[in-house]
């Protein structure tokens, strides 16, 4: 290692060793006034400079110089396919998804997300189209907020579709084939006979077709980030 860098490490080790050797019981010999004065003065001599954070920024800048791809879309490469938005906005979207976090939920009106798109013309671009695109690339998964009793539950699109199919079969149960009856029975088991629990009062609520259609028609969507970012450049 470079001598300059090694000297800094040695000084840190030296000071750390000194601190560890201080016997806390030695302070009992001093008066309360002396200790109070000491504790007031001592912090002024600590800079608490986090060299590693500052150096990591330099490392990051050097890495970007070496790999300019890091300046563009690289966490979620699929975003490059959004050819109807600018490169700058693609990068903002790419970074937003990482900052928001894997497995996090977001809404179409999430403030930090809408801020990215606030300058876009609604006639040219619609935020819901962007979210649907990300869902089609399996970066996001679409969910519905279904209001029941005192609260709402979060239901994925697959379950909503199962409810729709269930009620479709239910209304035509006089004309169902044997295969359709099997499908109906299976759906009934999977959907727990159309009952969900209210997290607020604990009551068991029957889910009706009206509730399902109301949920769909209200477009009460939210999305979950289900794909981790591309970590290829982390290893470089």
Image (spheres, helix red, strand yellow):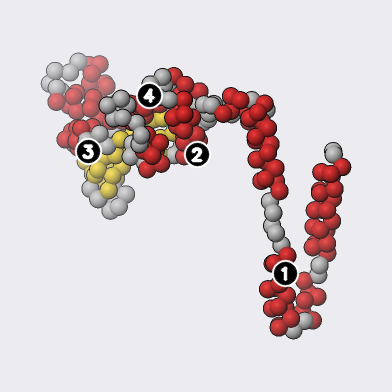
Mark nearer the viewer, 3 or 4:
4
Mark nearer the viewer, 1 or 2:
1
Query: Alpha carbon of mark 3 to alpha carbon of mark 2: how far?
Result: 36 Å
Which residue is identified by label 2?
Answer: 99
Query: Alpha carbon of mark 1 to alpha carbon of mark 3: how far?
Result: 65 Å
Which residue is identified by label 3?
Answer: 207
Instruction: Give the quarter of the image for residue 48.
Output: bottom right
Which residue is identified by label 1?
Answer: 42
Query: Alpha carbon of mark 4 to alpha carbon of mark 1: how far?
Result: 57 Å
First-in-chain label (2 vs 4)? 2
Where disc 1 sits, the SS reads: helix
CB contact under 8 Å: marks 2 and 4: no
How far across and down, in percent of the image, does residue 99 sit? Answer: 50, 39
Mark nearer the viewer, 1 or 3:
1
Give neighbour class at mark 3: few <14, some 14-19, many 20+ (Cα, 10 Å). Answer: some
First-in-chain label (3 vs 2)? 2
Is residue 189 visible in the rendered image? The answer is no
Left-right relation of 25 to 98: right
- Judge by depth and name the residue closer to the eye, 221 or 89: 89
Which residue is identified by label 4?
Answer: 133
At a point 22% along the width and 35% down the height, the residue shown is: 218
At a point 81% along the width and 43% down the height, the residue shown is: 5
- Judge by depth and name the residue closer to the eye, 99 or 140: 99
């Amino acid at each position: 290692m470079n001598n300059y860098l090694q000297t800094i490490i040695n000084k840190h080790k030296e000071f750390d060793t000194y601190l560890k050797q201080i016997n806390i019981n030695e302070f009992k010999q001093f008066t309360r006034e002396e200790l109070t004065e000491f504790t007031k003065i001592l912090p002024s001599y600590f800079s608490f400079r986090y060299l590693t954070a500052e150096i990591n920024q330099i490392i990051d800048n050097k890495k970007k110089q070496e790999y300019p791809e890091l300046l563009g879309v690289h966490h979620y490469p699929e975003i490059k396919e959004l050819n109807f938005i600018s490169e700058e906005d693609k990068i903002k979207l790419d970074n937003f998804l990482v900052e928001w976090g894997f497995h996090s939920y977001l809404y179409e009106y999430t403030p930090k997300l809408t801020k990215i798109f606030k300058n876009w013309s609604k006639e040219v671009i619609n935020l819901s189209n962007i979210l649907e695109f990300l869902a089609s690339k399996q970066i996001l998964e679409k969910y519905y907020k279904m209001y029941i009793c005192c609260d709402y539950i979060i239901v994925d699109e697959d379950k909503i579709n199962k409810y729709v199919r269930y009620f479709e079969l239910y209304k035509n149960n006089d004309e169902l084939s044997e295969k359709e009856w099997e499908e109906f029975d299976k759906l009934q088991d999977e959907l727990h006979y159309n009952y969900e629990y209210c997290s607020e009062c604990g009551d068991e609520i029957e889910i009706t077709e009206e509730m399902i259609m109301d949920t769909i028609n209200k477009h009460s969507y939210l999305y979950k980030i289900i794909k981790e970012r591309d970590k290829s450049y982390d290893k470089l």
